[in-house]
Amino acid sequence: MRQTILIGVLTLAWLPLFALAGPVNVNTADAETISAELKGIGLAKARAIVEYRKKYGPFKSIDDLTLVSGIGERTIEQNRADILLGDSADE
C-alpha cells in the first residue's frame, strides 16, 4: 500500500515534465515558447521560425512554415492542431 502511494505521488510530481504540446501562435511567440509547445521543434528550429518571420513577415498559412529551413511537412502535420497564426483557434 505504501509503495502504491509513493508511486502515485512520484507520478504526479513528474507529470508536468511530460505535458502534451499546446497551441502556440507562431506569428507572435518567442523561440523558447515555440520549441516548448511544438513536437519535433527544438530551439534551433524555433529560432529559425522567428528569424524567418522577422525577415519575411507573419506566416499567412500553416503550410508556409515549410519555407523555413529544417521544417518539413511531417513536422507540420504532427503539430497542425497546435499551430496558430492569429487571434483565433480556428486557424
Image: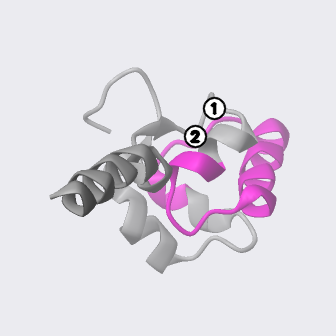
- Residue at 32% across, 25% down: 88
| Quadrant hosting residue 84 | top left
Say what secondary structure mark 2 lies in.
loop
In the image, is 59 to the left or to the right of 74? right
- Residue at 71% across, 42% down: 32
83 in the magenta segment:
no
The residue under label 1 is which amino acid type?
Ala
The residue under label 2 is which amino acid type?
Val
Q: Position of residue 13 (x, y in %)?
A: 42, 44
Give the residue number, with chain letter if any, for mark 1: 29
Can residue 20 be seen by looking at this rendering? no
In the image, is 79 to the left or to the right of 56? left
How crowded pointer 2 is (Cα within 10 Å; few <14, some 14-19, many 20+) is rated as many
Which quarter shows the N terminus?
bottom left
Residue most extreme to the top: 87
In the image, is 14 to the left or to the right of 81? right
61 in the magenta segment:
yes
C-beta proximity under 8 Å, tags 2 and 1: yes
**Residue in the foreground of this view, choosing between 74 and 37:** 37
**Residue in the foreground of this view, choosing between 27 and 6:** 6
Can residue 14 be seen by looking at this rendering? yes
Q: Main secondary structure of the magenta part?
A: helix
Q: Position of residue 4 (x, y in %)?
A: 20, 60
Say what secondary structure mark 1 lies in.
loop
Residue 90, relative to residue 34: is it above or below?
A: above
Which quarter shows the C terminus?
top left
Q: CA distance from mark 2 to mark 1?
A: 5 Å
Q: Position of residue 63 (x, y in %)?
A: 47, 60
Give the residue number, with chain letter if any, for mark 2: 26
The residues colored magenta run 35-64
- Residue at 50% across, 63% down: 39
